[in-house]
Amino acid sequence: MSRTQRAAAWLYLTAGTVYVVDRVTKAWAERSLAHRPPIQVIPHVLQLDYTTNSGGAFGIARSAPLLFAGATIVVSAIIVWYSLRVARPTFAVALGLVLGGALGNLTDRAANGWNLSGHVIDFIDFHVWPLFNVADSAVVVGAILLALTALPQEERGPGEG
C-alpha cells in the first residue's frame, strides 16, 4: 500500500468513525434528552441538553441553513477529490474529522427538513457558548489540525507533524 493510499485509509476511517459516533450520540440525545430536563454532568460546567439548530456550528447564522448545506456539499466533494493526493497521516486525519462532521450534520439537515434546510441536533452545553454536537466538534478540531499541519516545516516546533 502506498503512502497516499495509507493516508486515504486514515482519512476515511476517521470520517467514518466521526460519522457513526455523531449519528449514535444524536439518536441517543433525541431519545433520552428531548422534552426532559438537562442532565448535569459537571455542575455549572457541563450539561447535556437537547435542542435543534438550523444554522452552523455552535448556533451561528440560524437563518441560513441552505448556505451551510451547500458549503458542506462543496467542502465534502473537495475532500473526497483530494483524498488520494494526501500523503501525511496527520493531514488525512484532519480532513477526515472535517468530512465526518460535515456529513453528520448534512445527514441531520436531510432527515429533518425538505431540500437540506432542516435542523441539526445539538446537546453538549458548556455554558460559555451555544450548544453543539460531536460533528461540530470534529469540524472545529479538524480545521485547527489542518491549520497546524499546513504550516511550513520550518515554522513548526521540533517533533511536530
Image: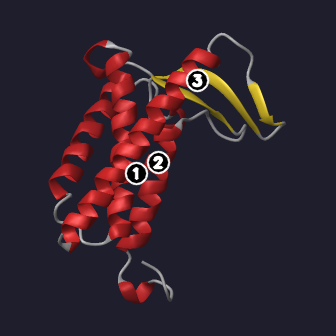
Seen from the viewer's position, the closer of residues 88 and 79 is 88
Task: Say whether residue 150 is left or right of residue 51.
Answer: left
Seen from the viewer's position, the closer of residues 20 and 148 is 20
Seen from the viewer's position, the closer of residues 36 and 27 is 27
Residue wearing tag 2: 138
Question: Is label 2 in a helix, a strand or a loop?
Answer: helix
Viewer-nearest of discs 3 and 2: 3
The image position of residue 98, as x and y in percent, is 37, 49
Query: Which residue: 25% across, 33% down?
Result: 70
- Earlier in the chain: of badge 1 and badge 3, it is 3
Would residue 117 be seen by someone viewing this image from the given angle? no
Identify the amino acid type marked 3.
Answer: Ala
Question: Is label 1 in a helix, a strand or a loop?
Answer: helix
Residue at the front extreme, as displayed: 1
Residue wearing tag 3: 29
Residue at the right extreme, as displayed: 43
Query: Which residue: 30% across, 72% down?
Result: 88
The crowding category of the residue bearing disc 3, from other C-alpha atoms within 10 Å (few below 14, some 14 to 19, many at least 20), is many
Residue wearing tag 1: 97
The crowding category of the residue bearing disc 2, from other C-alpha atoms within 10 Å (few below 14, some 14 to 19, many at least 20), is many
Residue at the top extreme, as displayed: 35
Place residue 39 in its image quadrant. top right
Q: Are marks 2 and 1 in contact (CB under 8 Å)?
A: yes
Place residue 155 in its image quadrant. bottom left
- Report, in whole angstroms, how far the alpha carbon at label 1 lies from the one at label 3: 21 Å
The image position of residue 159, as x and y in percent, is 49, 86
Query: Which residue: 40% across, 51% down?
Result: 97
Question: In the rendered view of the protein, which quadrant contains the C terminus?
Answer: bottom left
- Report, in whole angstroms, how far the alpha carbon at label 2 lies from the one at label 1: 5 Å
The image position of residue 109, as x and y in percent, is 36, 23
Identify the amino acid type marked 1.
Answer: Leu
- Earlier in the chain: of badge 3 and badge 2, it is 3
